[in-house]
């Protein structure tokens, strides 16, 4: 009996040890796999055309121990023939019955036959069309479009055929890979070790199966910032960034229905490192480009290798032209997108002396080189000009390139698109593209270690780009490829068909993707883990975390964040234990490691923060928290070591070498560094200290009164008091409440290090009105600390009469999605984007191309009912996504008012400085504030109007009196009377 045994454990704060690997009986795993067999094969699609049992008109791709032979014309493109071999291998992977692959001029006679071919390239396919056996009106003349169809009696000697036909080379390849995905072979079978679901019988249902024409013409990935992780892995496994490595990349891109690659470039040179690289890319059907700062198909590192003199066109024009000319000459007929323009050496800005006239001359000269070396007009060679960083400034100041050149717009490296064409702008022959980031090296901080890209935010920005006509090129920086598997799949799927995946279907997409990798049984649970850890990591990139990120004292914020992560880690571990052995490695890579490593890292920073606070307060638990932090740091290193050395028998060595702990500035540290912790010496005698929720001080040391946040029927129902020891000897404590209806959950006990007490109110017995009630805590030597509990039980406000949100402790916090009414107007409305944002879901004006407007009858608005306990000036803090001013106007705006007051126009980009942008992207939020007057306490309505599209509303905090206390995420949502929201 085969057993897989691991003894690796992870200890989560406040939890028992959770085993990452445990003994699993091979037989039980096999039974689980067999249970999966009965399920239909899944692709990330909303329909399947593969069945496990026969039906009328079905085609037996593999049945009864026999797989239907595959036929490809010998006149076909080499890339199609190669992909047919992948389909042959995929059928064998699923059924253990390899079909014959016939490459010939004529199709063989067979009862059932898979006919694969490209229109105009396969005489057999063309004859079917001519004889009206195959209708290709839906794909002929289209870009990369395929059709999969069962055809009865297509030709003499063949009873039934499964025809996989493409409008062009990649169309046919995509058709085959679609069949592969449908029968259960994940595009990530190699890159994430996703096992293939075994099925004895595979039947293709009748009908015309196609995904239509891709919406975006070029869809690809950029391998970037590849050291130390990917570079270490590639060097060890393949000896360098050579063809042995790149064939895996090419196949992945095509299986994901992408077609475009910017190869790795820091110290690498795609053409120069291995001449087979470009040859195989062209054969496979992958379009090669170079990054935004590598003109005319020359890698940046080639200038280091072969260049001479400065990278300066003003002083070294002839040398640069010769260098670039060789790039175009070497490119030959390989399908390519040629980057034009110029940045400074090493992806730096050009010198301050550079001007628009010089850059326009550079582009003019580069196009002359292209024309001369290709022997055809420059416009016939696809070209790209990347408006990246300062290059966009040149464009905004008037620099232009010929109309056939694609303008590659860019985000700000943090997933916020900088510029978009305007509705009504003249169409460009070369169109527009977008360069997006899932990974980045630069300010305010690198983020490279792990996935921090939640789908709703990706969707919102890409939807914005697509609706404004950006559909020629989509390319995304995926860093090391791993661990960006999930967002990479979505990026390329969405690029193919944005209309297919509206915001309402993002949950479904995530579930389908989980099912594609792991089957249906746990797909919903896995989808929740994937969505939640991405959301949590996006609150603040792991590299930006510090002990000070989340508040320790206000709203239990740091503890809540870690508890949320730990809940995910516990669920991930439970699912891991249920996974059969064949699925464990894939589950670890795609789910367990990112969840548990993220949870562990946040727990580490919480432990360090608590250690620092406890040291200031002299708590006996200070040194324990230091040791806990060291244990969590060691766990982080062990998790990475397991990934690198043991996972998949060491297949992914170095892939988790990326440092991520204790950055001191934007660039990564050479190694992870344990955060500083403090240790203290305790006196022998016991001494009592008391700390309370919402305060950093401790008593009896503090001179201020110890006052808890106010308890109300409409707010947080319990606040804590920490009673702690400041000495070595334990002591006993007693607690006396000043009122019988004010409850303390523990009234006496023995303390060695610390004890948390929870204070609450029995509202059925509590008197009305506002009052303070003392809570007396007595410790060693009869010493006492008195904590005041503020209790506010408004006589005029009863639960049954509440309408909307209710103020408590100086604020009303409202998640944007929980509006009372949404009023549509002028062909626009506020639309819910599920799960977008740091804490809940978001609202944004729709359509995103709607015209700007002033508040009034023509402007859609949201209304939020709320009950305020105070009058006078209130501050309203509106939390919006860090969307940029993509039309280069004065800024994106919304309007806001309370009740019937005149709406105020708020510009979310009013303070548009580099320092502000650093804060926006680091915090992943923009917080704007407006001031309003409220005449009297009671019911009020806060209204927010659309002024400009693009404003993504996440949260609203109305502050009265002293207002909300400092916290990273803002105060938790206030109490509200739940009623069905009305839409006018």
Image: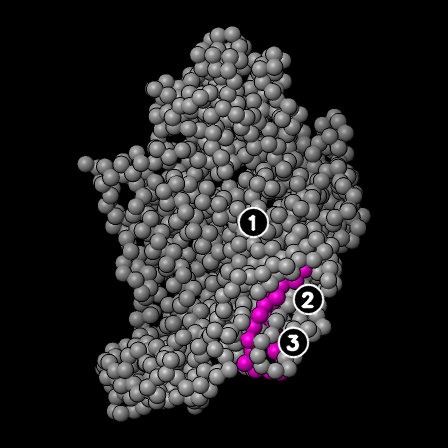
User: Hey, which residue is sitting farthest left in the picture?
Assistant: 1
Indicate whether 372 appears above or below 418. Answer: above
In the image, residue 95 lies at what x, y percent?
A: 36, 25
Residue 385 or residue 188, whichever sits in front: 188
Comes first in the chain, label 1 or label 3: 1
Magenta stretch secondary structure, dominant: strand
Q: Position of residue 299 (x, y in %)?
A: 61, 39
Magenta-highlighted residues? 860-882
N-term-proximal mark, 2 vs 3: 2
The quarter holding residue 519 reads top left
**In the image: residue 54, left or right of residue 497:** left
Q: Is residue 879 magenta?
A: yes
Position of the N terminus by quadrant? top left
Q: Separation of disc 1 and disc 2 at Cα?
A: 25 Å
Q: Is residue 719 above or below residue 415?
A: below
Q: Residue at x 40, y 33 (%)?
A: 40
Q: Which residue is mark 2?
A: 895
Asked where in the image residue 367 lies, by quadrant, the reply is top right
> Left or right: where does residue 289 sit relative to residue 39?
right
Residue at numbered disc 3: 931
Is residue 38 rendered to the left or right of residue 402?
left
The C terminus, quarter of image? bottom right
């Amino acid at each position: 009996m085969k057993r897989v045994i691991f003894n690796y454990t992870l200890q989560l704060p406040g939890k028992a040890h959770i085993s990452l690997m445990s003994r699993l009986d091979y037989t039980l795993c096999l039974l689980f796999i067999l249970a999966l067999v009965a399920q239909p094969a899944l692709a990330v699609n909303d329909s399947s055309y593969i069945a496990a049992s026969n039906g009328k008109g079905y085609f037996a791709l593999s049945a009864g121990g026999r797989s239907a032979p595959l036929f490809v014309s010998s006149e076909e493109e080499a890339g199609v023939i190669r992909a047919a071999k992948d389909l042959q291998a995929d059928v064998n992977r699923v059924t253990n019955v390899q079909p014959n692959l016939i490459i010939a001029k004529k199709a063989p006679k067979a009862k059932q036959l898979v006919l694969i071919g490209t229109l105009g390239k396969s005489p057999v396919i063309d004859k079917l069309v001519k004889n009206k056996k195959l209708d290709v009106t839906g794909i002929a003349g289209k870009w990369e479009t395929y059709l999969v169809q069962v055809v009865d009696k297509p030709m003499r000697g063949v009873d039934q055929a499964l025809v996989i036909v493409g409008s062009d080379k990649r169309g046919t390849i995509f058709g085959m890979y679609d069949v592969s995905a449908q029968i259960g072979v994940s595009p990530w079978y190699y890159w994430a070790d996703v096992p293939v679901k075994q099925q004895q019988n595979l039947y293709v249902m009748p009908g015309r199966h196609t995904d239509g024409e891709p919406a975006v013409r070029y869809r690809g990935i950029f391998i970037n910032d590849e050291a130390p992780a990917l570079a270490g892995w590639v060097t060890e496994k393949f000896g360098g960034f050579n063809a042995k490595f790149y064939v895996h990349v090419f196949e992945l891109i095509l299986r994901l229905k992408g077609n475009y690659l910017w190869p790795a470039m820091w110290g690498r040179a795609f053409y120069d490192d291995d001449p087979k690289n470009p040859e195989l890319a062209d054969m496979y059907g992958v379009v090669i480009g170079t990054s935004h700062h590598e003109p005319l198909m020359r890698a940046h590192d080639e200038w280091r290798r072969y260049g001479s003199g400065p990278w300066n066109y003003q002083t070294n024009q002839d040398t640069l032209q010769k260098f670039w000319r060789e790039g175009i000459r070497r490119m030959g007929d390989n399908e390519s997108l040629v980057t034009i323009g110029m940045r400074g050496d090493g992806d730096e800005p050009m010198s301050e002396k550079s001007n628009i006239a010089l850059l326009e001359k550079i582009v003019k000269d580069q196009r002359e080189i292209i024309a001369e070396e290709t022997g055809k007009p420059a416009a016939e060679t696809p070209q790209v000009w990347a408006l990246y960083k300062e290059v966009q400034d040149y464009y905004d100041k008037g620099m232009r390139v010929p109309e056939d050149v694609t303008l590659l717009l860019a985000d700000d490296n943090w997933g916020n698109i900088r510029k978009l064409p305007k509705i009504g702008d003249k169409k460009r022959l070369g169109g527009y593209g977008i360069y997006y980031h899932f990974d980045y090296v630069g300010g305010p901080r690198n983020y490279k270690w792990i996935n921090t890209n939640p789908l709703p935010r990706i969707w919102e920005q890409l939807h914005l780009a697509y609706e404004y006509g950006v559909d020629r090129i989509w390319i995304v920086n995926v860093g090391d490829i791993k661990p960006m598997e999930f967002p990479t799949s979505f990026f390329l799927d969405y690029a193919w068909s944005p209309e297919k995946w509206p915001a309402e279907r993002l949950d479904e997409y995530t579930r389908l993707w989980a099912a594609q990798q792991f089957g249906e049984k746990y797909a919903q649970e896995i989808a929740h883990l994937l969505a939640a850890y991405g959301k949590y990591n996006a609150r603040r990139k792991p590299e930006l975390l510090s002990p000070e990120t989340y508040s320790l004292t206000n709203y239990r914020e740091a503890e809540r964040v870690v508890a949320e992560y730990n809940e995910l880690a516990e669920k991930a571990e439970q699912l891991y234990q249920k996974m059969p052995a064949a699925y464990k490695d894939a589950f670890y890579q795609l789910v367990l490691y990112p969840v548990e490593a993220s949870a562990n890292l946040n727990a580490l920073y919480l432990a360090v923060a608590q250690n620092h606070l406890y040291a200031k307060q002299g708590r006996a638990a200070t040194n324990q928290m230091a040791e806990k932090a060291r244990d969590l740091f060691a766990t982080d290193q062990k998790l990475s070591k397991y990934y690198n050395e043991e996972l998949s028998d060491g297949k992914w060595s170095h892939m988790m070498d990326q440092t991520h702990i204790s950055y001191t500035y934007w660039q990564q540290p050479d190694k992870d560094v344990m955060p500083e912790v403090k240790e203290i010496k305790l006196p022998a005698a016991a001494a009592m200290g008391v700390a309370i929720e919402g305060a950093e001080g401790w008593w009896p040391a503090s001179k201020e009164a110890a006052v808890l946040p106010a308890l109300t029927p409409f707010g947080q129902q319990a606040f804590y008091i920490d009673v702690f020891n400041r000495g070595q000897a334990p002591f006993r404590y007693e607690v006396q409440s000043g009122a019988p209806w004010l409850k303390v959950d523990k009234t006496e006990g023995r303390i060695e290090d610390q004890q948390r007490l929870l204070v609450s109110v029995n509202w059925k017995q509590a008197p009305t009105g506002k009052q303070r009630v003392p809570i007396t805590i007595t410790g060693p030597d009869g010493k006492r600390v008195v904590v005041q509990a503020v209790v506010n039980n408004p006589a005029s406000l009863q639960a049954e009469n509440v309408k909307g949100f209710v103020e408590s402790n100086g604020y009303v916090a409202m998640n944007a999605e929980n509006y009372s009414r949404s009023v549509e107007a002028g062909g626009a409305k506020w639309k819910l984007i599920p799960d977008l944002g740091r804490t809940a879901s978001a609202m944004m004006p729709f359509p995103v191309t709607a015209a700007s407007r002033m508040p009034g009858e023509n402007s859609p608005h949201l209304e939020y009912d709320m009950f305020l306990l105070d009058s006078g000036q209130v501050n309203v803090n509106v939390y919006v996504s860090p969307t940029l001013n993509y039309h280069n106007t004065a800024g994106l705006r919304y309007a806001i008012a309370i009740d019937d007051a005149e709406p105020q126009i708020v510009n979310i980009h009013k303070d548009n400085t580099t320092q502000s942008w650093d804060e926006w992207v680091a915090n992943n939020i923009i917080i704007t504030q407006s001031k309003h007057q409220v005449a009297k306490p009671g019911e009020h309505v806060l209204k927010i109007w659309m002024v400009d599209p693009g404003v993504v509303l996440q949260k609203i905090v109305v502050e009265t009196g002293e207002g909300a206390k400092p916290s990273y995420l803002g105060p938790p949502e206030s109490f509200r009377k739940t009623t069905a929201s009305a839409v006018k």
